[in-house]
Image: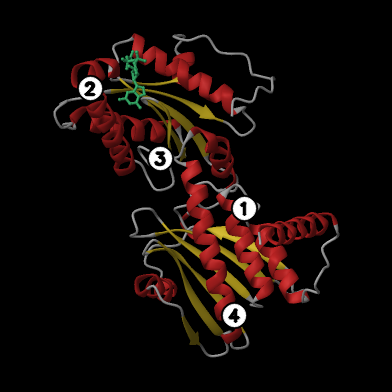
Amino acid sequence: MSVAYDIVAQEAASARALSALAPVPRSPIAPAQARLLASVAAFTHHRDTDALDHSLALSLAELAPARAVVLCKRAADGRRLESLVRCAADAQGLFCLHTGAPIADDPALEPVWRCMDQQQSFAETLADEHRLYVPILHEGRALGALQLESDTPLDGAHALAEGFARIYANYITLLNESERDKLTGLYNRRTFERHLQRLFDHPEPARAPHERRAGHAGPDNVWLAIFDIDHFKRINDTYGHIYGDEVILLLAQQMRASFRQADVLFRFGGEEFVVLLAGHDEAEARGALERFRQRVASYLFPQVGHVTVSVGYALAAMGDYPETVIDRADKALYFAKEHGRNRTHGYEELVRRGALAAEPVSTGSIDLF
Ligand SMILES: Nc1nc2c(ncn2[C@@H]2O[C@H](COP(=O)(O)OP(=O)(O)OP(=O)(O)O)[C@@H](O)[C@H]2O)c(=O)[nH]1
């Protein structure tokens, strides 16, 4: 018995070894399946959320097929839509991508909200257009929705769109985790450069194009501000790290409540935070930063009481190296710390009044990220 068993086992092992060496016979794959797999592979290849969003809309528009696909994403607070990506065929049938911020209370977005609230797909037929709405669900929550538009009924696209929505939800959750700080949920330093570039490309995303100032063509100015909690070591030493962490968490909440939707908030590490503000002039940027500083100073942190922050900021001009701008804001922050803390200082303002020496323009290419 045992010999026979060994022979059978040996034969099985050598068959496995042979099959490992022999070329695997390729079973024919339908072109549609091959295209689908290629699309999924291409779209899960991306490591940044913007590229992933674009790829999802494009893949679905091509495969559905749909005249247009709109990806609507909900903001973290769940109460508003944060971004729209629309992929639509032009007159030549080529797909073009448009990104933008939804207008609050836009009635055209009512079916999108219905789809997210009911967490269910549904189809609608308008005068000469068929529409399909599919929620993007993750752990019982709708992260957003897909809207497909076509001249013909989209019945066949239902399963495809739902499958894509599931893959997208899993993947975007992983990406979000890698882009955000675990304690506060703010963006981490890794994604800073991409956000800076995006602000230059799409200034003031919270406003609709018609709301922008007439004749305003290029990007608005962008300021980079660094906040540092004053005497944070003392807070840790007096109350312990758990309370220290709570101060960091509550400060992040204060940041979210104080800054506009268009401003981008980061935790750079430790007790250091960064905000990218798109604005018209320095007075506007300074006003927003001062409001935040005062808000923190008057907030009562549980157990710890009053906490203050020092703020340094600098103009991020198009073409500046991010590390140069960070360095300037850091110098202004250092000045604020040196001159009493709980203050806001701008690098350009300090240079203008001779309190800081102007730095030569950096021509290096150090990559800090
Ligand atoms: N609780 C907590 N503490 C942190 C974290 N990251 C950094 N720290 C602490 O933050 C403190 C920072 O101290 P310092 O850099 O000396 O600065 P400071 O005491 O805030 O003083 P100034 O910045 O000069 O006002 C250190 O004690 C770090 O251990 C964190 O994630 N949680």
Specify the amino acid type for callout 2: Gly
Q: Position of residue 294 (x, y in %)?
A: 25, 29
Q: Is residue 218 above or below residue 207?
A: above
Q: Earlier in the sequence, mark 2 or mark 4?
A: 4
Label 2 sits on residue:
240
Q: Position of residue 4 (x, y in %)?
A: 71, 62
Q: Nearer the viewer, mark 2 or mark 4?
A: 2
Label 4 beta carbon within 8 A of ligand 1: no
In the picture, the quarter occupied by the C terminus is: top right
Specify the amino acid type for callout 3: Leu
The answer to whether one can see residue 307 in this image is yes
Label 1 sits on residue:
51
Which residue corresponds to the image point at 62% horizontal and 28% vertical from the top-left?
320
Label 4 sits on residue:
157
Q: CA distance from mark 1 to mark 4?
A: 23 Å
Q: Is residue 250 above or below residue 150?
A: above
Instruction: Please tell me which residue lies in front, 30 or 148.
Output: 30
> For residue 360, what is the image quadrant?
top right
Specify the amino acid type for callout 1: Ala
Q: CA distance from mark 3 to mark 4?
A: 36 Å
Instruction: Please tell me which residue lies in front, 318 or 167.
Output: 167
Q: Position of residue 109 (x, y in %)?
A: 43, 71
Ligand 1: quadrant of the figure: top left
Label 3 sits on residue:
186
Q: Nearer the viewer, mark 1 or mark 4?
A: 4
CB contact under 8 Å: marks 1 and 4: no
Secondary structure at numbered mark 4: helix
Q: Is residue 328 above or below residue 79?
A: above
Specify the amino acid type for callout 4: Ala
Q: Earlier in the sequence, mark 1 or mark 3?
A: 1
Q: Earlier in the sequence, mark 3 or mark 4?
A: 4
